[in-house]
């Protein structure tokens, strides 16, 4: 009844109503909205490629899609996307979209590491994330007030950026400080911090690497009590133990806890380990993936359903001077805010300023071991997502996809992880990340086929978020103004 009224009032050109509804389920459905035609549809779930495809987007959702003859309907617009390759929008499960540059500040004469949010930087990176096809982000930690403000600005259209689900201030003792970090000490303080983050609309509660097992247990508990999901970047405590304590998501393919090394190797690691970044390769040199402790880790994660984000570029970054060049090559640098890049370079210099050729050789070998670790996680059936640990993706997202290819993942598997895999890690598989009628119209239209070379994922022509279409050029207008910026060809 209601539908009939709607019919009559909105459509005069009823004669146009007809035609195929994709998915073949609905019969006499009236198609309105916008029709996009002519593109090649890449479906990472079905692992299928369909040339000459079309999609109807209505009220921000995928209303219908198919191949060959486009449907007839009362469309407000028809847009030809011939020559482009369309996929669900990419998902960065580790993008600190609202974090500002890393900085060292002095408080009472003590150095404090901060990542204070800066509106201008956030607005820029949000646009760059979208420009490179990232439509959904998990932000694992920054100032929750800035993140709440981000959500508000994106929902009103003031800013253009991916839909983002945030962790608030990261729980970590000094020397980490400022509004991006918090360190509750009493039960009351833990409760108050989790309550504050929940009230600001955060989704996750991020527990960081220097916490003790008791603190991790408290953190996972208070997170759940306040409806937040406990996720962790760990070093002291093993992932196995943390999963048992209720942590549901693990960040970075570097579970560098001594507790995951077999006896002998463990004591050795504790003895050689210093304060700098060398511990990462020192851990990978000693880990035994087939040993009982790592096998227990794989089975515990699989049993608890805990997920892991692969940010292989973090592993690549700590391979010496070439690491930075690999992750942030000159042609990509204009798409990062200069203050973010310089903050990062400063941090890396502090960690690897005295890096020798020997360190480089060993860290490069460790990178190969981390590739193997990623493969082991995948083989164990552990849900994986793809992250950059940058400010929401940008060109580094395609760099990360390239690293997964280097790690031996097939192009189809990479595209699957980049879309539905990330959605699954974030519990959004019924909202985004797939070609399916009714899901959010989050799509990326690439200039080149990513199945031929995964790095083609870098060349987005258009990005659609909740049905709104934006061109790469429009989103990067200010970068295009820079004479030094390398234009994509
Ligand atoms: Zn991070």
Image (spheres, rainbow, N blue to C red):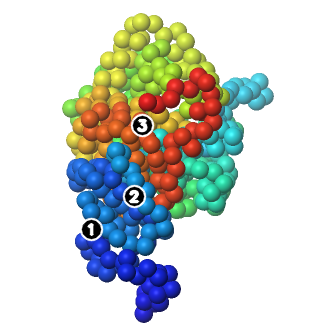
Mark 2 or 1: in front is 2
CB atoms of marks 2 and 3 within 8 Å: no
444 in relation to 356, above or below = below
User: Could you tell whether 117 is left or right of 408 in the image?
Assistant: right
User: Could you tell whether 200 is left or right of 75 in the image?
Assistant: right
Q: Any mark on residue 36, and which?
A: 2
Residue under label 3, please give it.
Answer: 459
**Element type at marker 2?**
strand
Farthest residue to the top: give it.
357
For marks 2 and 1 on the same chain, the one whose residue lies earlier in the sequence? 1
Residue at (59%, 22%) from the top-left corner?
484
Residue 221 at least partly seen:
no
Q: Find residue 350 and report its image quarter.
A: top right
Crowd rating for badge 1 (residues with CA inside 10 Å; few <14, some 14–19, many 20+): few
Residue under label 1, please give it.
Answer: 23
Q: Position of residue 419 (x, y in %)?
A: 36, 49
Q: Is mark 1 within 8 Å of ligand 1?
A: no
CB atoms of marks 1 and 3 within 8 Å: no
**Element type at marker 3?**
loop
**Element type at marker 1?**
helix
Q: What is the distance, in whole Å, between disc 1 and disc 3 at their CAs?
A: 29 Å
User: Could you tell whether 431 is left or right of 41 in the image?
Assistant: right
Q: Position of residue 271 (x, y in %)?
A: 42, 17
Q: Any mark on residue 320, and which?
A: none
CB atoms of marks 2 and 1 within 8 Å: no
Nearer to us in this view, 15 or 120: 15
Q: Is mark 2 within 8 Å of ligand 1?
A: no
Mark 2 or 3: in front is 2
């Amino acid at each position: 009844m209601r539908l009939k009224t709607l019919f009559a009032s909105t459509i005069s050109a009823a004669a146009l109503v007809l035609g195929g509804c994709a998915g073949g389920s609905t019969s006499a459905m009236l198609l309105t909205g916008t029709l996009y035609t002519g593109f090649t549809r890449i479906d990472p779930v079905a692992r299928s490629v369909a040339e000459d495809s079309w999609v109807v987007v209505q009220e921000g959702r995928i209303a219908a899609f198919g191949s060959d003859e486009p449907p007839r309907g009362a469309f407000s617009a028809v847009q030809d996307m011939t020559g482009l390759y369309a996929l669900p929008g990419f998902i960065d499960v580790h993008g600190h979209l609202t974090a500002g540059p890393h900085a060292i500040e002095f408080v009472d004469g003590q150095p404090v590491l901060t990542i204070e949010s800066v509106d201008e930087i956030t607005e820029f990176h949000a646009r760059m994330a979208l420009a490179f096809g990232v439509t959904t982000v998990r932000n694992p930690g920054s100032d929750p007030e800035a993140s709440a403000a981000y959500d508000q600005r994106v929902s009103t259209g003031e800013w253009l950026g991916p839909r983002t689900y945030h962790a608030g201030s990261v729980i970590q003792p000094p020397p980490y400080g400022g509004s991006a970090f918090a360190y509750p000490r009493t039960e009351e303080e833990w409760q108050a911090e989790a309550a504050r983050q929940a009230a600001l609309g955060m989704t996750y509660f991020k527990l960081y690497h220097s916490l003790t097992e008791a603190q991790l247990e408290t953190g996972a508990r208070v997170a759940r009590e306040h409806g937040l999901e406990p996720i962790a970047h760990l070093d002291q405590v093993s992932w196995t133990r943390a999963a048992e304590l209720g942590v549901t998501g693990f960040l970075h393919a570097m579970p560098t806890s001594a507790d995951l090394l077999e006896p002998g190797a463990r004591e050795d690691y504790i003895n050689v380990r210093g304060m700098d970044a060398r511990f990462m390769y020192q851990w990978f040199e000693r880990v035994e993936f087939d040993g009982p402790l790592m096998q227990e880790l794989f089975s515990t994660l699989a049993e608890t359903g805990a997920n892991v984000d692969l940010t292989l570029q973090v592993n690549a970054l700590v391979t010496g001077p070439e690491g930075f060049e690999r992750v942030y090559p000159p042609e990509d640098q204009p798409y990062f805010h200069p203050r973010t890049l310089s903050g990062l370079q400063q941090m890396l210099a502090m960690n690897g300023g005295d890096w020798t050729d020997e360190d480089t050789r060993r860290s490069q070998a460790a990178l190969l071991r981390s590739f193997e670790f990623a493969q082991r996680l995948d083989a164990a059936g552990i849900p994986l997502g793809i992250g950059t640990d940058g400010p929401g993706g940008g060109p580094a997202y395609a760099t990360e996809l390239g690293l997964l290819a280097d790690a031996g993942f097939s192009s189809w598997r990479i595209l699957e992880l980049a879309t539905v895999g990330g959605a699954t890690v974030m519990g959004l598989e019924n909202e985004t990340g797939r070609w399916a009628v009714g899901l959010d119209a989050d799509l990326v239209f690439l200039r080149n086929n990513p199945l031929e070379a995964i790095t083609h994922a870098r060349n987005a022509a258009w990005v659609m978020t909740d049905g709104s279409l934006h061109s790469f050029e429009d989103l990067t207008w200010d970068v295009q103004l820079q004479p030094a910026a390398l234009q994509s060809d």
